[in-house]
Image: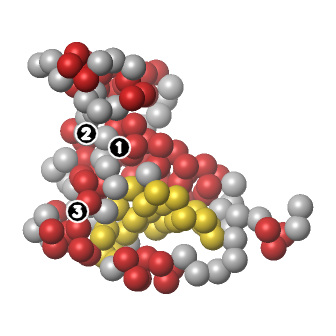
Amino acid sequence: MDNSKKIKKMMLILSKATLDNVYACFILANGARMEGIDSEIFFTFFGLEAIQKEKLDHLHVATVGNPGMHIPTLVGGLPGMEAVATKMMKNKIEKLDIPPVSEFLEILTASGTKLWACKLAMDMFDLKEKDLIEDLDGVLTVGDFYGRAEGEGTHVLFI
């Protein structure tokens, strides 16, 4: 393959901190690093919960409005359904030896993945950098994030 056509950087945008979205994003970022591809994650809107110290270990699976659950919305909205679905997914994740969110963030940082928080979303939710993980590489505007995406072989993926 022509080297000029190879993927050189994955820029992932995480907008929702449901367990399925967070793990999809983290696995893609980690997989990129394992292949020698640079990776960066931009946490925006509710995706910021994945890097909030108080929330990152308490993420859930969305059972309402999630077509991948294959359950009617009415059933998904019953009391306790989200907790049951979350427990089932966490058990599967543990059996597959996939690390918990906090540990996965440490692995990503150690691998060289850059972690960025969205300035606008932080302002909207009245968050300060002290509310976020210490391994955060910084807070960026959308323009700053796009500036980091410059260059041939960069792909941007919204999750």
**Residue 129, percent across and down?**
20, 71
Report the residue marked by disc 1: 101
- Of 85 and 30, nearer the camera is 85
Report the residue marked by disc 2: 59
Residue at horizontal 39 percent and vertical 29 percent from the top: 67
Q: Quadrant of residue 1?
A: bottom right
Mark closer to the chain start, 3 or 1? 1
Q: CA distance from mark 3 to mark 1?
A: 14 Å
Q: CA distance from mark 2 to mark 1?
A: 9 Å
Q: Residues within 10 Å of mark 2 (few under 14, many from 20)?
A: some
Residue at horizontal 33 percent and vertical 79 percent from the top: 141
Q: Quadrant of residue 152?
A: bottom right
In what element is the residue under mark 3? loop
Report the residue marked by disc 3: 132
Q: Is residue 20 above or below residue 27?
A: above
Q: Residues within 10 Å of mark 1 (few under 14, many from 20)?
A: some
Mark closer to the chain start, 2 or 1? 2
Q: Amino acid at mark 2?
A: Leu
Q: Amino acid at mark 3?
A: Leu
Give the mark toward the camera: 2 or 1: 2
- Of 40 and 13, nearer the camera is 13
Q: Residues within 10 Å of mark 3 (few under 14, many from 20)?
A: many
Give the mark toward the camera: 3 or 2: 2
Asked if the residue at tag 2 contacts the one at tag 3, i.e. Cβ–Cβ closer than 8 Å, the answer is no
Asked if the residue at tag 1 contacts the one at tag 2, i.e. Cβ–Cβ closer than 8 Å, the answer is yes
Q: Quadrant of residue 119?
A: bottom left
**Residue 125, percent across and down?**
13, 64
Q: Amino acid at mark 1?
A: Val
**Residue 80, percent across and down?**
15, 19
Q: Is residue 46 left or right of residue 34?
A: left
